Amino acid sequence: MEVAKIYRISGPVVVAQGLKARMYDLVKVGEEELMGEVIQISGDKVTIQVYEETTGLKPGEKVSNTGKPLSIFLGPGMLGQIYDGIQRPLPVLVKQMGNFILRGADVPGLDVKKKWKFNATVKKGDKVSGGDVIGTVKETENIVHKIMIPPTITGKVSHKIKKIKSGSFTVKETIGELDNGEKLYLGHYWPVRRPRPSKEKLFPEIPLITGQRLQDTFFPIAKGGTGSIPGPFGSGKTVTQQQLAKWSDAEIVVYIGCGERGNEMTEVLTEFPELQDVKTGRPLMERTVLIANTSNMPVAAREASIYTGMTIAEYFRDQGYDVSLMADSTSRWAEAMREISSRLEEMPGEEGYPAYLAARLAEFYERAGRVSCLGSDKKRIGSVTAIGAVSPPGGDFSEPVTQNTLKITKVFWALDAKLAHRRHFPAINWLNSYSLYNEPLKQWYVDNVSKDSIYLRTKAMNILQKEDELQEIVQLVGSDSLPEKERLTLEIARIIREAFLQQNAFHEIDSFCSLKKQSGLLKAIISFGDLAENAVDKGVSVEAVTNIESKNELVKARLIEEKNFNKKISEISEKIEKEVNGLIGG
C-alpha cells in the first residue's frame, strides 16, 4: 500500500504529495484514517475530497491509497437499513459510539456475521454469465433477494458452475465456484460512480401509479422515468416525496435525504419505521432503504450519497424489481459540488456552480430507466424511477439547478408557494407543470383505467385553463359581470380544485386514491358540469344549479372508502341528475 503525506488542507479538500493514485481511488487520510476520494491529479500532487470533518488534520500526516474506487457492499441485509452517504449503517454506529459519530469510523455496509438461508437455483455443470441469478435468499416477508453473478466476473463469456451449495451463509462466505476458479458469495462490491450494465433500455409504456390524483391523472410518470419537484421553502417537497415513497406501486423504495435539515430527516427516520405497507400489511421499511446525509454532515459525503442511492437502486433493478428513487434534494447536492469546486479553484459557471453541473445532473438521471436485465433470463425486467426535489432559492425557477434539471427530466411537478399559503395541498401548480409521458402512456390508461380517461383529463384541464383566463377579468370587474356560462365555468373549476386536485396526505382514506376511483370521481364532476351547462342554457340560474344539495356530496366524495366508492358515486350522480332535471322542469 502506497504511503504519502498531507501537503495542504482546505476544508474537505486535502492535497497529498507523493501518492501514486488513479482518479476516484479511495484513500485513508491522517492518523484517524478518514475516508476520502481522489478527484484531481497534478504532477506529484493528488487532490482528495474527504468524506468526514477535517478539523484537526495537519500537514505531514500520512495518506494511504486502498487502490480501489469508492464502492458499496451489495447483498442481503440492505432492506430496512438506514445508511449515511457512504453506506455506513447509522443504527450500528449509534450502538458503537452513541449519538455522535466519531471520525474514521469504518463499518461494513452489510452485517458480516448474520447468516442467511441460501437456496441455490443452479447446479454443478450449469453455464452462467454476468447477471445470471444463481439462487435466492428470503430477505423479508415479501421480498426475495436474488443472488446474481456479479456483472464484472464474466461479461459475455459463459462459465460452468464448478460447485454450488444451498445452506446458511454470511455475505462473505463462499457459496460456490466457477470453472475459472472465481469464488461466488452472497454479496459483492460495486463502484458507486459506474452505472451497472443491462442488456437494453425499454420504452416507457407503464405508469408508476402513485395514488396521488394530480400526478396520476394529469401529469403521470412512467416506470423507469425521471421527474423533478421544484419548489420554494415550505411548499411541500418533502411531504410530496414521502407520499410517493409510501404509496407508489414500486416494489423497492430508496429514499435519499441529501443535505436536508436534520429535523426533516428525523421525521422521515421516525415515521417510516411506523408506516404500514398498504399492499402487504407489513412495515413499509421492509422494502425501503434510507440514506440520511443531513446539512450538518460533511459536504463531500453529500456529493457521494446520490451515487450510493442510485447504485443500490440499480442493484435491486437488476433482480427484476421496480424501484422508486427519491432524492431530496438535488439542490443541496449541487451546492456540495459548488463548494468542492471552489476549493479546487476551478473556473465557476453560472451563480458559482461548476461548469460541469449540467453534465453531472444528466449523468445521474441517465441511470434511471426500465431495462431488460443482464443475464440469460430474457423475462427479467426491472426499472429505476428517479424523482428529484429541487430547492431553488426564493422559489426562483430560473436558477441553474432547476433549469438544468428541467432540460433532463420528463416530468415537472411545479410546487407553488401561493397555493401552499392558501392551504391547497399538494401545492402543485397545474398550469406550470407538465409530463412528457402523457402520449406514451395514453393507450395504457385507455386499456386499464377507462376508455374516456384521456377525454376527462383534457376536458378538466381545459376548464382549469379557462378559469385562469377568466380570473384576470374577475379581478378587474368582479365575477357578477361575467356571462352565465363563464360564471358556471368558474364554479366547475372550483369543484375540480376542491374535490379532485386537493388531497390530504394525513387522512387515512384520502392519502391514497386508486386510478379507478380517480377516473370515477373526475367523470362525476365533468358529468355535473355538462348537466349544469345544459340547465343554464335552458334558463336556470348558475346559483340555483350550484346550490343543489347533492353538489356538497360530490365535493366530499374523495373521502369515500375504495370498497364503497362505485356504489356511492353512482348514487350521488343519480341524485345530481334528478335535482338538475327538476330545476329545468320547474
Image: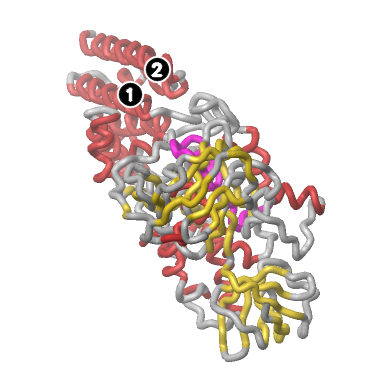
Q: Is residue 582 above or below residue 449?
A: above
Cα distance, mark 1 to mark 2?
9 Å
Q: Amino acid at mark 1?
A: Gly
Q: Is residue 233 visible?
A: no
Q: Residue at x 29, y 22 (%)?
A: 528
Which structural element holds mark 1?
A: helix
Figure quadrant of residue 87 = bottom right
Q: Residue at x 56, y 36 (%)?
A: 138
Residues in magenta, as a range: 238-262
Choose between 524 and 104: the one closer to the eye.
104
Figure quadrant of residue 285 = top right
Residue 223 pos. (x, y %): 37, 44
Mark 1 in CB contact with mark 2 (< 8 angstroms):
yes
Residue 578 pos. (x, y %): 27, 9
Residue 410 pos. (x, y %): 35, 53
Residue 399 pos. (x, y %): 46, 65
Q: Is residue 370 above or below residue 445?
A: below
Q: Is residue 294 magenta?
A: no
Choose between 190 and 368: the one closer to the eye.
190
Q: Is residue 245 magenta?
A: yes
Figure quadrant of residue 340 = bottom right
> Which numbered dot is residue 520?
1
